[in-house]
Amino acid sequence: MKKAGCIFFIVLDMIFIHQICYAQISYEVFSTPPVDRNSRSFAAFCQTISLRPIIKGTFVLTKHEKGKIKKAPESGKVIIDGMRGFVLNNIIPNPFSVVLMENNFSLTSKRGFIFTLDNNKTLKNVFYSFRSVFEGEFSILLENFEVYFSEKDGGWTVGVVPKDTTIRFFMNSVIIKGDTDVRNVCVIKKNGDILEYYLTDHVYPESLTDEEAGYFKVK
């Protein structure tokens, strides 16, 4: 099972390898005290997030890697369902879908599955942490991640650092920024390379279409 977990993160890492110049990312949030179970400001933040459990939008991904040639950004659609998981539909330049849900992770191209992983403990911990925020309760998140939070000028920043050594081997930390919407997500890898997602066109439907819900059905 541990080997399968490593393969999962290797494949996830391979999805994002090629491009890049280096980005100027602010790590200021990590200078704040870590969130604990009694944090009122973060609890209020999670309660606000839980009011809109479904988010749809578009993303542009820019990759920043040392010593690599910068290529055009990737773009696509994102679906976040706080109870079911999330979907990244990469459209440009190469169509593929990444789906994370409670008991399954899959990477799929037009030709079918490239990779799938079922019932992995590390994967479940990531999912339950993700879901707990949308439930307005963050204790599970704190069990699996060190969390940092700050608010300034109507905006907010969340920084998370995985406690699981398997995850940290590939993903050192994540910085999420927003205001009334999630605007920017930066994934900082162990070697310092950065995946920077810009989110736009946010929509908050009450439910998913049948086609969208289909992503969360294990085939």
Image: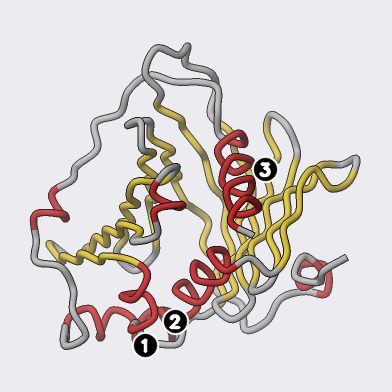
Q: Is residue 153 left or right of residue 137?
A: left
Q: Is residue 143 above or below residue 89?
A: below
Q: Is residue 184 left or right of residue 157?
A: right
Numbered disc 1: secondary structure: loop
Q: Is residue 114 left or right of residue 9?
A: right
> Residue at image x 42%, y 43%?
169
Compare residues 59 and 149 and report the one nearer the observer.
149
Numbered disc 3: secondary structure: strand
Residue highlighted by disc 2: 132
Q: Is residue 44 above or below residue 93?
A: below
User: Residue 63: horizontal and vertical position, in percent?
Assistant: 45, 30
Residue type pointed to by label 1: Glu
Residue highlighted by disc 1: 137
Q: Is residue 18 left or right of residue 32?
A: right
Q: Which is more N-terminal, label 3 or label 2? A: 3
Q: Quadrant of residue 75?
A: top right
Residue type pointed to by label 2: Ser
> Residue at image x 64%, y 76%?
84
**Circle 3 Cα neighbour tier, 10 Å, few/some/many (<14 / 14–19 / ≥20):** many
**Which quarter of the rendered picture does the C terminus lie within?**
bottom right
Residue highlighted by disc 3: 90
**Circle 2 Cα neighbour tier, 10 Å, few/some/many (<14 / 14–19 / ≥20):** some
Q: How far apart are the two marked residues, 1 and 3, measured between alpha carbons?
A: 30 Å
Q: How far apart are the two marked residues, 2 and 3, measured between alpha carbons?
A: 26 Å
Q: Which is more N-terminal, label 1 or label 2? A: 2
Q: Which is more N-terminal, label 3 or label 1? A: 3
User: Residue 132: horizontal and vertical position, in percent?
Assistant: 44, 82
Numbered disc 2: secondary structure: helix
Circles 2 and 1, Cβ within 8 Å, touching? The answer is yes
